[in-house]
Image: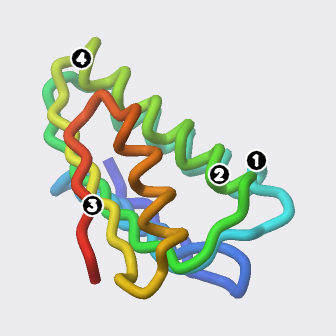
Amino acid sequence: MENLFIEATNYTPQIDFQGKIGVFNISGDCYHEYTTEFFRPIFEWLKKYTNDAGKKIVVNFKLEYFNTSASRRFQEMIDILEEYQLKKKGQIVINWYYDKNSPDNLEAGEEYAKFAKVKFNLLPL
């Protein structure tokens, strides 16, 4: 499957999904007013990618700022990956990178980690 790359803007993160090696990088800011539209092609790509069973997938979240709407989209992404691990024997690792000087970002990562059904690492930058 081809990679998915979306360049960052002032309001959207850089998306770099490297399908051949199973590494997904999401970095930057995400406070686009229309997150559903922005994330639609990302979810479509991810759902196609997870059609085949047994892949190892590493997701690296390196976010500086994101709004509530983006937070919901991140949870949707995590849900897709959890279902993949459960139903298709995938191996999922999520790395949540946070700035040590940003308690909000750490707190958000802790909330995701608390409910995650996949390996979820909180890593300081």
Q: Which residue is mark 2?
A: 39
| Residue kind at label 4, given as amino acid type | Lys
Nearer mark to the viewer, of 2 and 3: 3
Task: Name the residue rendered at 19%, 28% in the picture.
Answer: 90
State which tag comes first along the sequence, 2 or 3. Answer: 2
Asked if marks 1 and 3 touch (Cβ < 8 Å), the reply is no
Residue 34 is situated, as x and y percent measured from the top left of the image, at 83, 57
Residue annotated with mark 1: 36
Say which element carries label 2: helix
Q: Marks 4 and 3: which is nearer the front?
A: 3
Residue 122 is tagged as 3
Q: Earlier in the sequence, mark 2 or mark 4?
A: 2
The picture places residue 73, in percent across and down from the top left corner, at 62, 46
Against 65, residue 26 (above or below) is above
- Badge 3 local density, few (<14 within 10 Å), some, or many (20+)? some
Image point (43%, 33%), residue name: 48
If you read the primary sequence from the N terminus, does the residue marked by circle 1 or circle 3 appear first? 1
> Does residue 118 appear to the left or right of 26 in the view shown?
left
Q: CA distance from mark 2 to mark 3?
A: 23 Å
Image coordinates for residue 33, horizontal then vertical, percent: 85, 64
Q: How is the image coloured?
A: rainbow
